[in-house]
Amino acid sequence: MLEITVNNITHQLDIEPDTPLLWVVRDELELKGTKFGCGLAQCGACTVHLDGKAIRSCVTPISAVAGRLITTIEGITPISESIAPDEPKQLHVLQEAWIEQQVPQCGYCQSGQIMSAAALLEANPTPSDADIDIAMAGNVCRCGMYGRIRKAIHSASTKLEQINPKAEELELAPIASDQEQETDNG
Amino acid sequence: MGKWTRRAFLTTGALVGGGLIVGVAIRPGHRTPKLAELVENEGETLVNAWVKILPDNSIKVIVPHAEMGQGVHTVLPMMLADEMDADWNTVSMEQAPAHEEYASNDIVREFALPGKAPGIVEDTLKGVTLKLAQQMGLQITGGSFSVRGTGTWGMRTAGAAARELLVNAAADQWGVAANQIRAENSYLYHDQSNRSAPFSALAEAAAKVKGSTQPTLKSPDQFKIMGKHVERFDIPSKVDGSAVFGVDVELPNMKYACVKCAPVFGSKVSSVDSRDAEKMNGVIKVVNLGAGIGVIAERYWQAKKALDKIKVTYTQPDIQALSSADMFTQFGQAMDAAVANGDEEDDYKIGNARSVLSRSSEVIEAEYRVPHLAHSTMEPMNCTAWAHLDQLEIWAGLQNPLGIRNLLADEFDFERDQVVINNVYLGGGFGRRAMDDYPVQAAKLALALPGVPVKMIWSREEDTQQDFYRPAVMSRFKACLDSSGKPEAWENQFVDKHEPVEAPTLPYSVANQYIHYVNSPTHIRFGPWRSVDHTQHAFFTESFIDELAAKAGADPYQYRYDLLSNDLRARSVLETAAKMSDWGKPLPEGWGQGIALHRSFNTIVAEVVDVDMSNGKPRVDKVFCAADPGYAMSKDGFIAQMESGIIYGLTAAMYGEINIENGAVVESNFHNYKMLRMNESPDIEVEIINSGTDTLGGGGEPGTPPIAPAVTNAIYAITGNRLRQLPINKHVIA
């Protein structure tokens, strides 16, 4: 039995320990936003956060992340179950920027792109073009929307500065209180 | 062929429980009841093949094309809603079912007879082309056809006809002249009597009015939605992870499958030892697929691990050219033989190129080559199939769902309506998802485990090595110049012709041209790859015209400009790109500019690149793209397509090469089949030229062809080295 915490919810899983985190998240937890692209950590479509850092879940065995905190694309959206289903979704500042810049085309790589970008902004709230190049070079977009991704990251960064000028106050993945509770209990 | 009949409309209204049919405005024949069965829900009003008015006065547009990021699920509703004068804020869309009633007649029609047909033949044409599309099982998303085909002949016409029906119904009801009624934001107004009504209130009355097949379409100055920036419907679900692609389909008690096919196309499984695999955790069944093996297991990872343990031997097909090098040798020999034996297949001939060349004192010759290319959609091929209740049900992202349905029915002995296709978002298409191999595999797996849904997911390795490839092509040129340096004769021979037929033709005025080809097939299977034949021919022709400019000592832009005196539209596109890029501007040491122009899918695109080779390796700093599609129906959508097409083409130009060794594909994953990434991606500036709505061009593909020659022409400008083979990073010499 393995224990993992994904988006602040802890799960007990009976699964082969070499199973990549990607397939656990997708098929056992049914969080389908994280995508399979290459299986070799070459494309970034499977990017999730492990303790706040971007990792490639397709090459991360589930046994290696037991007991650690994992965040997927579904978890960076600050929605708690207490929000009524018909209320508009609250989006992460990067997700808003992605819509403003009309970034996605096929959209398949975009969960991974946003997760890489979120980890970047967490570490460096005002990245330069060169910083973006380094942080995002692991994420392939076959529709070639790199220019829009770059613009969206800059735009989100600007917006974050306006909302919250102090870097240390940045909270990219706001956690709903009831989910925190669940983690503590789990 | 069906005819418009009064009876069709009247009986239709009675046939549909709960809903009302306002009219069959678009397509001939008594066919609305069939459509209603397919798409109408309780309380909805089917206006015609493509639009429903809901009781709350919202509008639902039915889109018969697949969304793969090109924005078709938004731009087609824009076109319909604008002509209908609908309130855009209440417009939504749904995907049309894979059914004959939604066969791509408008695409066949645009393909058969581009541009506007004389009004008198329109009805006949629509009947003929629908029949043709149905017979071909065509419901295809490709060929950059959706906007100019379905959009123009389906959506705009449907919207305008629906608006006319509603206006006429209001005129009847209010006892006023139709021309006194205006439609705006899904309401009808008679200003003189201060009356108004929502579309939904008149839908039923409109059912009694015959629709026009030739409604008056708006002129661009009347557009309220078309040509504007509209946010795409599909984007919100693509930023929060909720969009459902083929790989995301979930069904109760679903199992997972992995497959591996013979590395050499044409091989068959000759022996299988799956004893070890069958003992592994979670393994349910090993299935011989003929050309390969599939494993069905409880979980994906179990299936994948078990597949690796299976020992398979394959038959050896009879193949002549076993490697990429062998293939180019074969092409060269076939080309030589065709010329020696007079076996050329004529492609285009004007004047007498050969005799002019034979008299010339200086013939310029060059041979160009491009390698095989894989599509590499971000989402590897996958398909979920379920054989249940005498049905075969399929979930996948498909560019040709109707064709796949018919093929599966024929292949596995089902009636066509027993095969149900659920088309979902495509994680990239680029032509790959128009092929039928992966649904056939999934169906075989599901039929081996009846009653249980099976999701088959290819590995990236399988996706790279079992593609339908952009072919490797060789192209040879001969030309001579007149005393002013302009080309007097142009001869071009190449291997293998697919489509579009006009791909090798020049936009430039050259009095003597002979373009011909020879077929030289290999065992590597062909697939349409974003812009199909245009991708290689633009590289060939735009490089060779650049060679001629250099030979003539002319500026590459000016040389092309002077040769476009008979094509002012193309000249204007070229001129725009040159202006955008400040062509000829001073650049740092080691930098240079390159230009290329190509017309494809009826859109003319010119691209200028600024290339930096100051540290020895080419880096594309900026791309200036001018494009004339006639009219860009979705402004930002069209710009996005140019950006995407450029990066797709630039990836291939810089890195793309599928090598064949011992009959099999060498490359396997993104470490050896490289993709352009953020840090190598140039800034792209796009300018749209809306020259007129009469001749609409496509958007999905035309951005791709000019980029490779623009870059290699820039490299020539910087280094004096002419790259006649791709990819650039393999062949470039600093």
Image: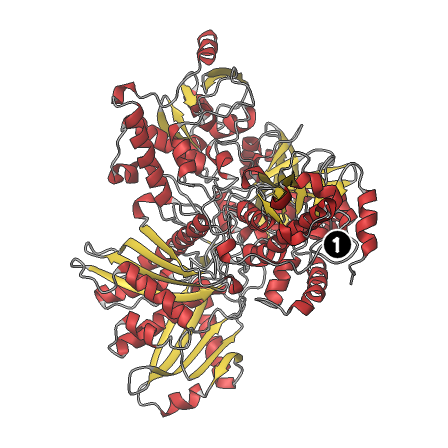
Q: In this picture, is B671 found above or below B511?
A: above
Foreground pick, B477 / B9: B9
Question: Badge 1 is on which residue?
Answer: B210
Q: Where is residue B159 in the image (x, y as percent from the top left)?
A: 62, 51
- Tell me the SS state at disc 1: loop
Residue plotted at (76% across, 49% down): B32
Foreground pick, B649 / B341: B649
Work out whether residue B197 can be spotted.
Answer: yes
Q: What residue type is labelled 1?
A: Lys
Work out whether residue A1 can be spotted.
Answer: no
Question: Exactly how many numbered labels are in the figure?
Answer: 1
| Residue located farthest toward the bottom when viewing the structure as drawn | B359
Q: In this picture, is B506 found above or below A77?
A: below
Q: How crowded is mark 1: few (under 14 residues within 10 Å), some or many (20 or more)?
A: many
The chain that hosts pointer 1 is B
Left or right for A167, reference B191: left
Q: Position of residue B70 (x, y in %)?
A: 50, 49
Q: In this picture, is A157 found above or below B529?
A: above
